[in-house]
Amino acid sequence: MADGDFVIVHGRFSGTGLPRNWIAADVVRIADGVLAEHWDVLQDEAARAESKSGLPMFGDSFAD
Protein backbone atom coordinates (compact mmCIF):
# COMPACT_ATOMS: atom_id res chain seq x y z
CA MET A 1 0.00 0.00 0.00
CA ALA A 2 1.27 3.49 -0.74
CA ASP A 3 -0.05 6.93 0.11
CA GLY A 4 2.03 9.94 -0.84
CA ASP A 5 5.49 9.52 0.73
CA PHE A 6 4.47 6.48 2.82
CA VAL A 7 4.66 2.81 1.80
CA ILE A 8 3.54 -0.21 3.85
CA VAL A 9 4.72 -3.75 3.13
CA HIS A 10 3.03 -6.70 4.88
CA GLY A 11 4.58 -10.16 4.98
CA ARG A 12 5.15 -13.47 6.74
CA PHE A 13 8.52 -14.86 7.87
CA SER A 14 8.50 -18.66 8.00
CA GLY A 15 11.09 -21.43 8.21
CA THR A 16 13.17 -19.54 10.77
CA GLY A 17 13.20 -22.33 13.37
CA LEU A 18 10.99 -20.32 15.72
CA PRO A 19 7.85 -21.95 17.19
CA ARG A 20 5.61 -19.63 15.11
CA ASN A 21 5.81 -17.66 11.90
CA TRP A 22 6.21 -13.91 12.25
CA ILE A 23 3.83 -11.46 10.67
CA ALA A 24 5.54 -8.20 9.77
CA ALA A 25 4.45 -4.77 8.69
CA ASP A 26 7.10 -2.33 7.52
CA VAL A 27 6.28 1.34 7.06
CA VAL A 28 8.71 3.57 5.21
CA ARG A 29 8.69 7.22 4.30
CA ILE A 30 10.42 8.34 1.13
CA ALA A 31 11.58 11.96 0.79
CA ASP A 32 13.13 13.23 -2.43
CA GLY A 33 13.58 9.65 -3.66
CA VAL A 34 15.53 8.60 -0.54
CA LEU A 35 14.48 6.45 2.42
CA ALA A 36 13.83 8.99 5.17
CA GLU A 37 12.23 6.92 7.96
CA HIS A 38 11.42 3.29 8.72
CA TRP A 39 9.19 1.63 11.33
CA ASP A 40 8.35 -2.04 11.68
CA VAL A 41 5.99 -4.25 13.64
CA LEU A 42 6.61 -7.95 14.27
CA GLN A 43 4.24 -10.35 15.97
CA ASP A 44 3.71 -14.09 16.22
CA GLU A 45 1.15 -15.41 13.76
CA ALA A 46 -2.13 -16.29 15.46
CA ALA A 47 -3.25 -19.92 15.26
CA ARG A 48 -6.77 -20.83 14.13
CA ALA A 49 -7.93 -21.24 17.77
CA GLU A 50 -6.66 -17.72 18.64
CA SER A 51 -8.32 -15.92 15.72
CA LYS A 52 -11.37 -14.02 16.98
CA SER A 53 -12.61 -13.42 13.43
CA GLY A 54 -11.92 -16.98 12.29
CA LEU A 55 -9.67 -15.58 9.55
CA PRO A 56 -5.89 -15.97 9.20
CA MET A 57 -3.60 -13.00 9.76
CA PHE A 58 -1.97 -13.47 6.36
CA GLY A 59 -3.24 -15.07 3.18
CA ASP A 60 -6.36 -17.17 2.89
CA SER A 61 -5.44 -20.19 5.04
CA PHE A 62 -3.87 -20.88 8.42
CA ALA A 63 -0.28 -22.13 8.60
CA ASP A 64 -1.17 -24.81 11.19
Image: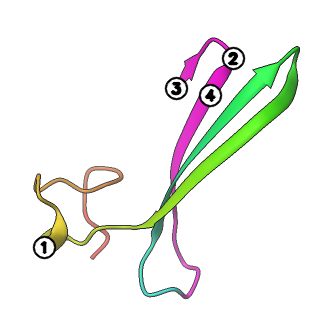
Left or right: 59, with 53 as reference point: right
- Residue at 17% x, 70% y: name it: 50
Q: Does residue 9 lie above or below 61 as drawn?
A: above
Residue under label 3, please give it: 1
Residue 41: image location, x then y, percent: 54, 54
Q: Amino acid at mark 1?
A: Ala
Residue 28: image location, x then y, percent: 69, 34
* SS at badge 2: loop
Q: Does residue 50 lie above or below 53 as drawn?
A: below
Please give the range of residues in magenta. Answer: 1-17
Left or right: 27, with 35 as reference point: left
For the residues labelled 2 and 4, the Cα–Cα distance comes to: 7 Å
- Residue at 41% x, 79% y: name it: 20
Left or right: 35, with 17 as reference point: right
Residue under label 2, please give it: 5
Sequence-first disc among 3 and 1: 3
* SS at badge 3: loop
Q: Does residue 60 lie above or below 45 as drawn?
A: above
**Contact flag, marks 2 and 4 (Cβ < 8 Å):** no
Residue under label 1, please give it: 49
Residue under label 4, please give it: 7
Q: Amino acid at mark 4?
A: Val
Between circles 1 and 2, the one closer to the viewer is: 2
Q: Nearer the viewer, residue 37 or 55?
A: 37
* SS at badge 1: helix
Left or right: 36, with 48 as reference point: right
Q: Residues within 10 Å of mark 3 (few under 14, many from 20)?
A: few
